[in-house]
Image (cartoon, grey):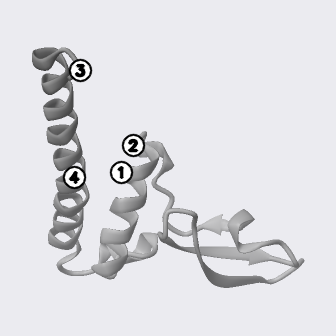
Amino acid sequence: MTEANRETYTDKHGAQHVVLVYGDIEPELGVPLLNLDSLGLPEEVEARLRMELWERGIREYTDAFQPGANERIAAALRGALRLAVSNIVVLCQEEYNLLTTGGR
């Protein structure tokens, strides 16, 4: 059986991932050690959450079991959603301006 190597790679959004890599496969095809896909978040929000988690030392599943991890995860969520909230406010302003000025 091929031994797995732990590797880190950066995705197209700039978020880092820790994965297990078997043989000669590319890290992007490795087994993620923190998979957020099942959260069903939009791609940009998931990437931002991953970056926020990374900054707070939550990089693998086992990091979530460490003392203080709940607080760090909550802070990461707030950080990731702050961006989403500001995007929504900008979108609302743009849509409102279109409706009230007729696109002028």
Q: Are the two marked residues, 2 and 4, in contact with CB atoms closer than 8 angstroms?
A: no
Residue extending furthest toward the left = 100
The nearer-to-camera label among 1 and 3 is 3
SS at mark 2?
loop
Side of 58 relative to 12 (left or right): left
Side of 28 relative to 52 (left or right): right
Judging by the rendered image, the residue that carries numbered circle 2 is 41
**Mark 3 Cα shell of 10 Å, populated few (<14), some (14-19), many (≥20):** few
Judging by the rendered image, the residue that carries numbered circle 4 is 81
As shown in the figure, which amino acid type bears the numbered disc 2?
Answer: Leu
Q: CA distance from mark 3 to mark 4?
A: 29 Å
Q: Are the two marked residues, 1 and 2, in contact with CB atoms closer than 8 angstroms?
A: yes
Q: CA distance from mark 1 to mark 3?
A: 29 Å
Q: Up-down: is 3 above or below 88?
A: below
Judging by the rendered image, the residue that carries numbered circle 1 is 45
SS at mark 3?
loop
Q: Up-down: is 78 above or below 8?
A: above
**Mark 2 Cα shell of 10 Å, populated few (<14), some (14-19), many (≥20):** few
Q: Up-down: is 4 above or below 48?
A: below
Q: Quadrant of residue 75?
A: bottom left
Nearer to me, 78 or 2: 78
The C terminus appears in which quarter of the rendering?
A: top left
Q: Name the N-terminal-most of marks 2 and 4.
A: 2
Q: Are the two marked residues, 1 and 4, in contact with CB atoms closer than 8 angstroms?
A: yes
Q: Position of residue 50 (x, y in %)?
A: 39, 65
Nearer to me, 67 or 94: 94
Q: Are the two marked residues, 3 and 4, in contact with CB atoms closer than 8 angstroms?
A: no
Q: Name the N-terminal-most of marks 1 and 4.
A: 1
Q: Residue at x 33, y 82 (%)?
A: 57
